[in-house]
Amino acid sequence: MKGIEYLQGKLEQKRTRVLVRYNFYEQKAGALDLGISTPKGLEWLSTINGWCTKAVDNLADRLQFKGFDDDLFGFTDMFNQNNPDIFYDDCMLSALISSCSFVYISRGQVTEQDGQKIRFQVIDGGNATGIIDDFTRLLTEGYAVLDRDDDDNATKWAYFQPGKTEIYEEGKDEPVAIEEFNSNYCALVPIIYKPDAKRPFGHSRISRACMDYAKSAMRTVKRAEISAEFYSFPQKYVTGLSQDAEKFDGWQATMAAMLSFTKDDEGGSPSIGQFSAGSMSPHIEQLKATASMFAGETGLTLDDLGFVTSNPSSAEAIKAGHESLRLMASKAQRCFGVGFKNVGYIGACIRDDENYRREELFETKTLWRPTFEPDAAMLSSIGDGVIKLNQAIDGYIDEKKMQTLTGIE
């Protein structure tokens, strides 16, 4: 066991990086001003970019968890008692932002109708960490901050051990509550997005490239805003004025409907000119190029980022344009499916006070709705294909498989 002090230090190291990504998702992050094109007096001007938010939400909104197949341990009942309409989305959204989220599992009240109720609490990746088992993706030791004060200091936290959870509060050396159960793993379960051997806690949807492109876009928009002021009111000039001519206010000269100039003593008159207005095209082209790189990084299209191209001809064309996003969604479903099964597994151990073997879950499968819902034309094509398949192999496509293909119950 590493101990609670080790896990607290580990969380502090990871928390900074998680908060950076939450700033980009919440559109609070700014871009560094290079100090080249910003005139004096406009240093305060800042811009906001929502591409990172779009990248996360576009994938999260397409992930719709449906339930469990061959639910031998009664996972569905436990999840139905914990607001499944928002629980799944909460887990997946937090995991996409911070690479992983955590579910704290504990006992609730006992009712005559449902028996022992199991509570699931979602904790973001910036408030929990642990030591992971590479075989089961469960934690052998964990730590989570359950409450913080206004200064972001932890006031309540939990230390998780196999079969035991200790709750601590600020100013108290001993745990204020201890919950014991029968399991070889902790009651803190990670929900991980895209884990690998080097980074078992996964990768964030908001990658370093996404943040860099978003900052570049913010600087481009800022330069465009500054250029727009000069584009709206091009600079003018007057030549041939007498040395004794009265100075006039620049703003008044710009906004006045008519200006009058008198001849000097020698009969000369000044001439008025105007500098050519700067073009906005370079800024638009640079922003579009940055958007193309961001779209390639996240599997989106330029239409998703606000640059209208050609209208897709059909739902199939839309699906083809989002093929990269479909593959990312399929990968996310596999990753999150393992996490939800682990949550149900630990919940069943606590509910039944029985140390079930993790290998017993191999028959339980996770069910997801289609990433892209079919339209009427696609349903017609699917129907024709189903008829031909069932003619070749009687009963090959049944109601269950049709529901998997179309999402229609």
Image (spheres, grey):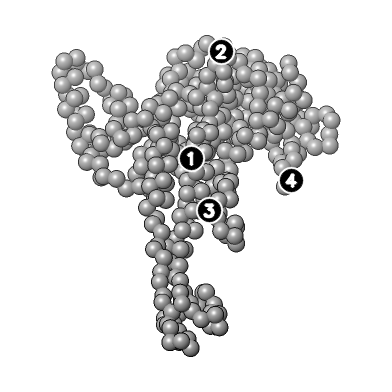
Q: Would you identify the image quadrant in which residue 325 lies?
A: top left
Label 2 vs label 4: CA separation? 38 Å
| Residue denoted by label 2 | 135
In the image, residue 20 sits, relative to residue 2, either above or below, namely below
Residue that appears at 46% across and 43% down: 51
Pointer 1: residues within 10 angstroms few (<14), some, or many (20+)?
Answer: many
Q: Quadrant of the C terminus?
A: top left
Front residue of this view, candidates 18 and 374: 18
Tag of residue 151: 4
| Residue denoted by label 1 | 213
Pointer 2: residues within 10 angstroms few (<14), some, or many (20+)?
Answer: few
Percent position of residue 319, x then y = 30, 34
Mark 3 and mark 2 in contact? Answer it, CB < 8 Å.
no
Pointer 3: residues within 10 angstroms few (<14), some, or many (20+)?
Answer: few
Label 4 vs label 3: CA separation? 37 Å
Label 3 vs label 1: CA separation? 19 Å
Mark 3 and mark 1 in contact? Answer it, CB < 8 Å.
no
Secondary structure category for the residue under label 1: helix
Q: Please, what is the three-letter code of the amino acid marked with disc 4?
A: Asp
